[in-house]
Image (cartoon, rainbow, N blue to C red):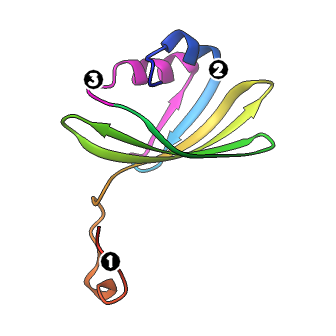
Amino acid sequence: MQARDWVGLGELLADDLAVEWPVSAERIVGRDNYVTINAEYPEGWAIRVLRIVADGETVVSEVEVPHDTMGVHRVASFWTVRDGKIVDGREYWTALGSDPSPQWRAAYVQRW
């Protein structure tokens, strides 16, 4: 992704890949759609991998995606990999600080 190697990305994905984005209530069906959405994302972004955990067919990643004009996003992604291809996934995208902290928690948390 960081290298913008869209052909290489496509080679990692199953033809019938399905990826859900629950925060925006979207489902991306098909390798070509997923690659195109990523290739057409407005330039100015980078990716910083925070962690990757794998267990059998399941791979989980947490990345930070700073963007020149859209701010910093965090993404938690859950992938299923079979026969060397990603077959499905679920990604939770959020902008840092975008979810308001309710007043009742103020005594128990630190804002950063």
Tell me which numbered mark, 2 or 3, is placed earlier along the sequence. 2
Q: Amino acid at mark 2?
A: Leu
Eye-nearest disc, 2 or 1? 1
Q: Amino acid at mark 3?
A: Glu
Which residue is at a point 28% across and 60% down the rendered structure image? Answer: 97
Which residue is disc 1 drawn over? 110
Q: Nearer the viewer, residue 41 or 52?
A: 52
Eye-nearest disc, 3 or 1? 1
Q: Nearer the viewer, residue 62 or 27?
A: 62
Q: Amino acid at mark 1?
A: Gln
Magenta stretch in the rendered image: 24-45
Q: Residues within 10 Å of mark 2 (few under 14, many from 20)?
A: some
Task: Say which element carries label 3.
Answer: loop
Task: Say which element carries label 1.
Answer: loop
Horizontal and vertical percent position of residue 66 = 31, 40
Left or right: where 17 falls relative to 58 = left
Q: Residues within 10 Å of mark 3 (few under 14, many from 20)?
A: few
Where residue 14 sits, quadrant-wise, is: top right
Which residue is disc 2 drawn over? 12
Quick check: 94 above or below 47?
A: below
State the CA–CA distance, disc 2 to disc 1: 40 Å
Is label 2 in contact with label 3 (beta carbons under 8 Å)? Answer: no
State the CA–CA distance, disc 2 to disc 3: 22 Å
Task: Say which element carries label 2.
Answer: loop
Quick check: 5 above or below 42?
A: above
Tell me which numbered mark, 3 or 1, is placed earlier along the sequence. 3
